Image (cartoon, rainbow, N blue to C red):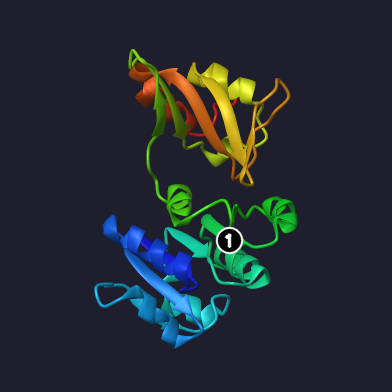
Amino acid sequence: MHFVIMGCGRAGSTLAHLVEDRGHTVAVIDQNPDAFRRLGAQFEGQRVTGMGFDRDTLIEAGISDAYAFAAVSNGDNSNILAARVARETFGVSNVVARIYDPGRAEVYQRLGIPTVATVRWTADQMVRRLLPVGAVSEYRDASGSLVLAEVRVHIGWVGRPLAVLEAAAGARVAYLTRLGDGIVPTKDTVYQEGDLVHVTMRESDIAAVERVLATAPVEVA
């Protein structure tokens, strides 16, 4: 899979290496060619000089074939603009934008752009939002039979009550991470795009829970 990253600061260069180390191709965009020195000589991906929201620059970086786009420059406006261009102009559905002003996060979420706050999140968490990975185990009980894990949820579940997710998956949502904050769900909590869902389940049920939540819910006629 191909990934395009705008911004070659500490977060962007770290993210580029994390993605490349997983066997994917990467193009990094930065308007300052000196910034590419952070990538080091071992980096095999593209280095594209230009603005990350410029169509020609994005095309040069391979956005037309990109699986995902990450905007991690040092400007909120540039990041959200680039993310919107990647999604709305080039049809890249898997995008993430880094923000400095958490007050803007809710606005960006309404635009369908998942955001990552700079202070509380790192390149590793951004990789977990971009890459198609399975459940990420966070805790096991002493017997090893129960697991607390972050599970990827299909965008088709957006707007559905967590109680519906639980019933379909046969597992319990322990908590959400939303815009960098932990949320203990209530009976009225619904899944929002960009939420990280942490599920408690039996170890033997992990594959089944992943399978249910990784696909869109079945509509009842």
Which residue is drawn at the image coordinates 64% and 65% (left, top)? 80
Relative to 186, residue 61 above or below:
below
Q: Position of residue 217 (x, y in %)?
A: 55, 29
Would you identify the image quadrant in which residue 202 lies?
A: top left
| Quadrant into which the N terminus falls | bottom left
Relative to 152, residue 104 above or below:
below
Which residue is drawn at the image coordinates 53% and 57% (left, top)? 95
**Does the image show residue 159?**
yes
Q: Which residue is mark 1?
A: 98
> 155 left or right of 148?
right
> 87 left or right of 140?
right
Q: Position of residue 51 (x, y in %)?
A: 55, 81
| Quadrant into which the C terminus falls | top right
Relative to 67, residue 208 above or below:
above
**Does the image show residue 220?**
no
Q: Amino acid at mark 1?
A: Arg
